Image (tube, grey):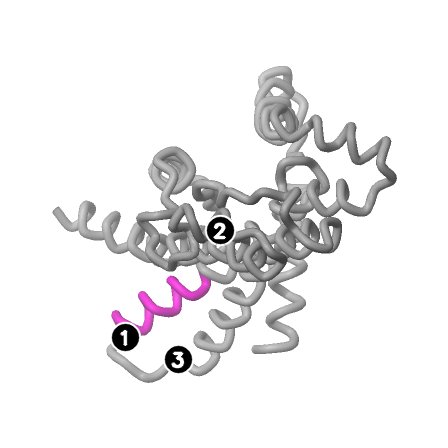
Amino acid sequence: MNDIIEIIISASTWVLPVLLAVTLHEAAHGFAAKLFGDDTAQRAGRLSLNPIRHIDPVGTVLIPGLLLLTGAPFLFGYAKPVPVAFHRLHPQRLGVIGVAIAGPATNVLLAIVSILLLVGLPSFSAAVNDWLATTLQQSIWLNCILAVFNMLPIPPLDGGRVLTAISPMPIARVLARMEKTGMILLIALIFLLPYVTGILGVNLPIFHWLVIEPASALVDFLAGIFA
């Protein structure tokens, strides 16, 4: 019984950070799109802070749950993408960049808020303070990981859309065509390839190189400023 309670308490320190991180990330895309002239997200009811409107059964529930159950050293997840009619953005290239950056920027802001709350944590009971401190630490890490991951320059990630927007038209067309296959290629690169090479006895921690190490540097940078 005690083991079950410990598992529930441990999982609870991730629930709020995950819900806030993915919900506000997607809502930020919608608000930015509205700012640049596209109300598609608003008409779809996605300019909302209600997590239920943004939850993806796989990305928000299944993947984080499996990572928790398997004791993964990091947590990762995503919400349903907010619908954006990019052709309606004005000015279009700046609009695409603004909409793309809004999500990761929101995650960085959440990490900063978490650091400030952690620094100014009120004095509650030891158990409550431990839970709050752990939850805020998870929030800092999770938001930095999401910010870095989403800014990888691969469509359909936010960084890929920024790259598409700033590229010359011939390159932009090629990158735009990667929207449908880019995520499959990304998963193959950072998860499947290391798994296969691991079976062959070759350590290839691509996710660690591309995401965890930069996220760790971002955590240290923000803590150095705001802690």
Q: N-terminal of the two: label 2 or label 3?
A: 2
Q: Is residue 118 above or below residue 217?
A: below
Q: Secondary structure at mark 3?
A: loop
Disc 2 crowd rating (10 Å Cα; few below 14, some 14-19, many 20+) is many
Residue 26 badge: 2
The quadrant of the rendering that contains the C terminus is bottom right
**Residue 126 got which mark?**
1
Quote the CA–CA distance across marks 1 and 2: 35 Å
Is 127 within the magenta?
A: yes
Up the image or down, 173 lies above or below 166; here it is above
At 66% across and 42% down in the image, what residue appears?
87
Q: Which residue is mark 3?
A: 121
The Cα atoms of the two marked residues, 2 and 3, are separated by: 28 Å
Q: Residue at x 69, y 36 (%)?
A: 154
Mark 3 or mark 1: whose residue is earlier in sequence:
3
Residue 192 x/y as whole percent: 58, 23
Region in magenta: 126-137
Q: Residues within 10 Å of mark 1 (few under 14, many from 20)?
A: few
Question: Residue 168 vs residue 53: left or right?
Answer: right
Rendered residue at 75%/50% (across/down): 93
Does 74 sit left or right of 91 as displayed? left
Tell me which amino acid carries mark 3.
Leu
Q: Amino acid at mark 2?
A: Glu
Q: Secondary structure at mark 2?
A: helix
**Where residue 66 appears, x then y in whole percent?**
37, 35
Residue 216, image quadrant: bottom right
Question: In whole angstroms, how far apart are the C-alphas of marks 3 and 1?
Answer: 12 Å
> Which is more N-terminal, label 2 or label 1?
2
